[in-house]
Amino acid sequence: MSLLLDDVTLTYPDGDGRLTALDRVSLEVPAGTVTAVAGPSGSGKSSLLAVAATLITPDSGSVRVAGVPTGRLSAAERAVLRRRAIGIVFQQPNLLPSLTALEQLELMARLDGRRAAGSRARDLLAAVGLADQAHRRPHQLSGGQRQRVNIARALMNEPSVLLVDEPTSALDQERGAAVLGLLTRLTRDRGTATVLVTHDRAHLDAVDAVREMRDGRLTATAAAAT
Ligand SMILES: Nc1ncnc2c1ncn2[C@@H]1O[C@H](COP(=O)(O)OP(=O)(O)OP(=O)(O)O)[C@@H](O)[C@H]1O
């Protein structure tokens, strides 16, 4: 179950004209692999994630999530698809301050009408190395630990596609490398099609492909940096 963007163009209103944020972008991410999209500020990385997440509908081109063409879905159908098939890890872990790590994960499942999510939540916290911190609230965790809760939460509903925005920007070198290693391992173990966008090319040796974004265009597939 992969992610497929085909010939996607996205423009925003800009004064009297339009600004092209994504210019005929095509991207295929097979299940169980990580593609990193690197590029400078303003190059279109967040726009790419928003289109892949079905949060923004492009002007033209198509987006398929886990084989489902998203172009003709209603807003309500897209919301269900997002909840069930897409995990999103934002740059700032937007965790709820009053909930423990375990409760943050259980809430995701409950919002999707799933019951008995406790054991899956515990398994995921263990998978990100936080089995001992399950009952801590966000203010009792470090920045790197909060980012790991964020990643575990995004995987709670077994998404086919995992979209990650600048996972290492708030972390030091060592923690940044650990988070990228973790994302790569979870992607392989859980078979997600993972896209991570970053302005920082450090730690990308573990990913399967690195694409460069420039002025809304994606370069051809390049081998991962070694
Ligand atoms: N809602 C919007 N309305 C108008 N223009 C926008 C909007 N969002 C983004 N843009 C413009 O689209 C272009 C791409 O922006 P985008 O946020 O996708 O880049 P980015 O690579 O994610 O940047 P950063 O690394 O700084 O987050 C930029 O020129 C930006 O100014």
Image (tube, grey):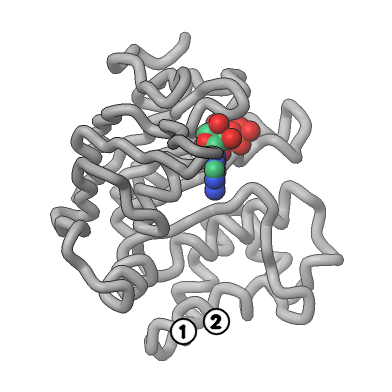
Identify the image quadrant of residue 184: top left
Q: Is mark 2 within 8 Å of ligand 1?
A: no
Badge 1: how crowded within 10 Å, few (<14), some, or many (20+)?
Answer: few
Which residue is most to the top?
A: 226
Q: Which amino acid is tagged 1?
A: Leu
Whether residue 34 sits left or right of residue 169 in the image: it is left
Q: Which amino acid is tagged 2?
A: Leu
Query: In the image, which disc is placed on residue 107?
Result: 2
Residue at (55% x, 55% y) in the render: 151
Tell me whether circle 2 and circle 1 mark residues in contact (CB < 8 Å).
Answer: yes
**Which is nearer the eye, 221 or 183?**
221
Q: Mark 2 and mark 1: span between their CA atoms?
A: 6 Å
x and y, in percent, of residue 47 in the image: 46, 41
The image quadrant where one finds ligand 1 is: top right
Badge 1 is on which residue? 111
x and y, in percent, of residue 103 in the image: 63, 80
Q: Is residue 182 visible?
A: no
Residue at (68% x, 63% y) in the render: 94
Residue at (37% x, 59% y) in the render: 86
**Which is nearer the eye, 151 or 79?**
79
Whether residue 128 sits left or right of residue 10 in the image: it is right
Identify the image quadrant of residue 105: bottom right
| Residue at disc 1, secondary structure | helix
x and y, in percent, of residue 152 in the image: 53, 60
136 shown above or below 47: below
| Residue at disc 2, secondary structure | helix
x and y, in percent, of residue 100 in the image: 71, 77
